[in-house]
Amino acid sequence: MEIGRIALSRRHALAGAGGLLLAAMLPRGPARAGTRIVEDQTGPFAPNAFVRIAPDDGITLILPNVEMGQGIYTGEAMLIAEELDVGLEQIQIEAAPPDDAYVTKLIGIQATGGSTSTIATWTSLREAGAVARTLLVRAAADRWQVDPASCQTEAGMVRHVPTGRTLSYGELAVEAAALPLPAGPVALRDPSTFRLIGHAQHRLDGPAKVDGTAVFGIDIQQPGMKIGTVAACPVMGGVLLHVDDSAARRVPGVRDVLTIGNAVCVVGDHYWAARKGLEALTITWDEGVNATVSTGTVYNQLHEALQGPAVVAHAKGDAKGAIARAAIRVEAVYQQPLLAHATMEPINCTIHVTPERCDIWVGTQVPMRARDSAAEVTGLPKEKVFLHNQYIGGGFGRRLEHEYVTQAAQFA
């Protein structure tokens, strides 16, 4: 059973997980210490989807992949910061919202997975930083009425080499924003000049995770939030036949018992009430066609499939002939049990639905798919569904699925 917090009113409710859900009443999540997620920072200089620079010298990098322990916030920040010529300590990090601008071309969707993040963004993020740097240099050169080639960047400043004059990126933000984007490709830094890439760096999310101030999806708290705990059918494809909730409704602190096709949610003022209410339910499931599926069933199906034609990804040499001619042949069968994608942070979701908009606070590897599922359930247009992605306490592919967001939206 997972723990979460939800906000509930007569028409607004929950967020969900396969053992519990959450819902919140306010439209913005808190900033994350350490990486300082600033979801509402705009700034006048935004030359692309990844860089924002404000007149107060605030530099925000919007990173397309989500941090779930693999260090990608630091890795991707290094790519942009290297080309932008700023230190990692100078930047703030924001998780990318659901948007086509953050689609990973390597896999065709906006997703973090398959160990593709660095290779997929190696060029695009460096180019994003280089474009911003080019425009800032041009803005400084225009103000000084000098050749851009006589200017250099360093530590968030543009320096005119012959005179030593400097301007910070923030001082140039408004002017840089007014310039047209470069007509063609911009020059990327020579790897021999790299200060960050290829050099040991402290992880940007390290301090917050050590001191406990990092905010994961399950940490979201808003005034008035309630908690929902969920019981889902234990068999894939099964449905809810009947639930006796009379005892659950007598538990102090229980506010409501909600049902959808294959799950039940007990909503309480706090986790203990919701948990005790869930334990008090009497549930009858129809487990459906998969009721008798076991590990043995799965093994048998796999072995039967081995007898059919193989899917050959790449052929080199004559493997069949070599085996047939071998003087000695050794055969062995290796089997492993199904391995759960069990994450340290329980699956959770916080959601607030009104007739005008839907806000979701969740850690997900597929933000666009999660947003779209909530839009489909609520009937709201996609542009009225706002997903605020959070730190993920372990993904392992589990959060490439988004059924828990769909479930939360259904209960809400």
Image: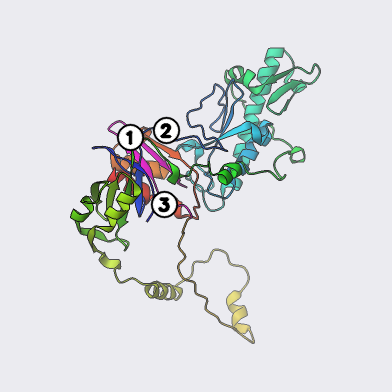
Give the number of the disc on residue 28: 2
Q: Amino acid at mark 1?
A: Pro
Instruction: Indicate the quadrant where residue 235 lies.
Output: bottom left
Q: Amino acid at mark 2?
A: Arg
| Residue 259 screen position, x and y as percent | 24, 51
Q: Is residue 360 visible?
A: yes
Instruction: Indicate the quadrant where residue 205 lies.
Output: top right
- Magenta residues? 344-367
* Secondary structure type for disc 3: loop
| Residue 64 screen position, x and y as percent | 53, 40
Q: Which residue is mark 3?
A: 347
Q: Which residue is mark 1?
A: 381
**Mark nearer the viewer, 1 or 2:** 2
> Would you call the spot at circle 1 few (<14 residues within 10 Å), some (14-19), or many (20 or more)?
some
**Front residue of this view, candidates 211 and 322:** 211
| Residue 167 screen position, x and y as percent | 69, 19
CA gap, disc 1 and disc 2: 19 Å
Give the number of the disc on residue 63: none
* Secondary structure type for disc 2: loop
Taking 258 as reference, is 317 above or below it?
A: below
**Front residue of this view, candidates 256 and 309:** 256
> Would you call the spot at circle 3 few (<14 residues within 10 Å), some (14-19), or many (20 or more)?
many
**Front residue of this view, candidates 357 and 19:** 19
> Would you call the spot at circle 2 few (<14 residues within 10 Å), some (14-19), or many (20 or more)?
some
Residue at image position (61%, 74%) is 318
Is the N terminus in the top left, top right, bottom left or bottom right quadrant? Answer: bottom left
**Mark nearer the viewer, 3 or 1:** 3
Q: Amino acid at mark 3?
A: Ile
